[in-house]
Amino acid sequence: MKNDCLKLLFTMLLALAGVAASAAEYDFETGGIYYNILSEDDMTVEVTASPSIYGYEGSITVPPTVEHDGKTYVVAAVGSVSFYGNSVDTIVMPSVTEVGLSAFVNCYSLRHVSMPSVTTVGDYAFYGCRALSSIEMQSVEQVGNGAFDYCEMLTSVDLQSVTVIGWDGFYSCSSLTSLDLPATLTAIGDEAFARCTSLDTVRCHWTEPLACRPAFEPAVLDSAMLCVPAGTKAAYEATAPWNGFKNIVEEGRSSIASTQSSVSTVTVIDGAIVIGGETLQEVEVYTPGGECVHRGTDARIEGLPHGVYVVRVGQGTVKVVL
């Protein structure tokens, strides 16, 4: 059963109640976007909901600054429920640092988001954005509860600056194929990655594994590759949930799972696949999905993106992780 159903229901009802209230309240409008003043001292404003029954539509670019009554304000935030259920397909907000509670809930048409300066994503901020396929969020530190629930088309997410992921943070992001969890990440909430059924690679950077309950799917635990820092495999094998992964490999070391013997050896050195052996043989490199990405007799194969590959050398095959 999904985590904290009562909390979810309460928060969603609160957000719904806020739509009507916020839709009629705004301090000023310019360029088709409505704003509330946050601070006259700091000269900051936040985007708020449109009073129109149709709300915002199409492609929206939130400017870094806006003019009102002869004053220049910095657009620092997108307020709670500002775009709730609106028909936006692209949102660009270069200076915004915070996205509020349920700000984009059920924006079913939303496909692209650029928010390079955002550090905080509020609870349920992008809940139900089922078409969202790309998002620029390299500065995000806090991912709220349910922030990306049911973003079913999201294939990748940049977590390089993240310190906290709330419960249900990426629940049912069923197209997400890989995770790169930074050493800065100190907390992962319950069921944060439940129903992320397409995960094939999870890369962790902690030298001491983080204990948590993200609820990786059984199929993911069976088939995905867990990549951990060199010398830490034993620690991950002793710590839940990471000890549930059947394929744990250490970065910087040969990550071979040989299925047949071969006269050649296959190792990973400095991000390249290196083929060794007494005789030169045909080498083929495949993705887990069966796509051939290299064929030849090279002894060193470079330039492939990070991920899991199956290397065929002569009659032998090995699995490696770059």
Image (cartoon, rainbow, N blue to C red):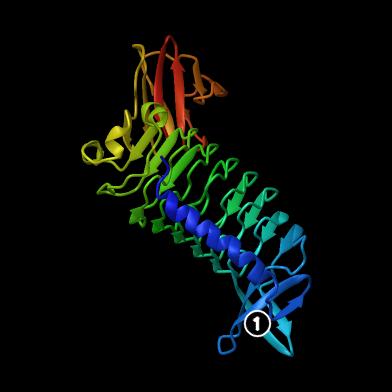
Q: Position of residue 201 (x, y in %)?
A: 43, 36
10 Å neighbourhood of mark 1: few (<14), some, or many (≥20)? many
Residue 251 visible to the viewer = no
In this rendering, the answer to whether 19 lies above or below 175 is below
The residue sitting at 47% across, 38% down in the picture is 196
204, 168: nearer the viewer:
168
Q: Which residue is mark 1?
A: 73
Q: Position of residue 175 (x, y in %)?
A: 55, 37
Indicate the quadrant where residue 308 lies. Answer: top left
Residue 243 visible to the viewer = yes
Q: Position of residue 285 (x, y in %)?
A: 50, 23
Q: Amino acid at mark 1?
A: Tyr
- Indicate the quadrant containing the N terminus: top left, top right, bottom left or bottom right: top left
Q: Position of residue 82 (x, y in %)?
A: 64, 65
In this rendering, the answer to whether 33 lies above or below 297 is below
Indicate the quadrant where residue 44 lies. Answer: bottom right
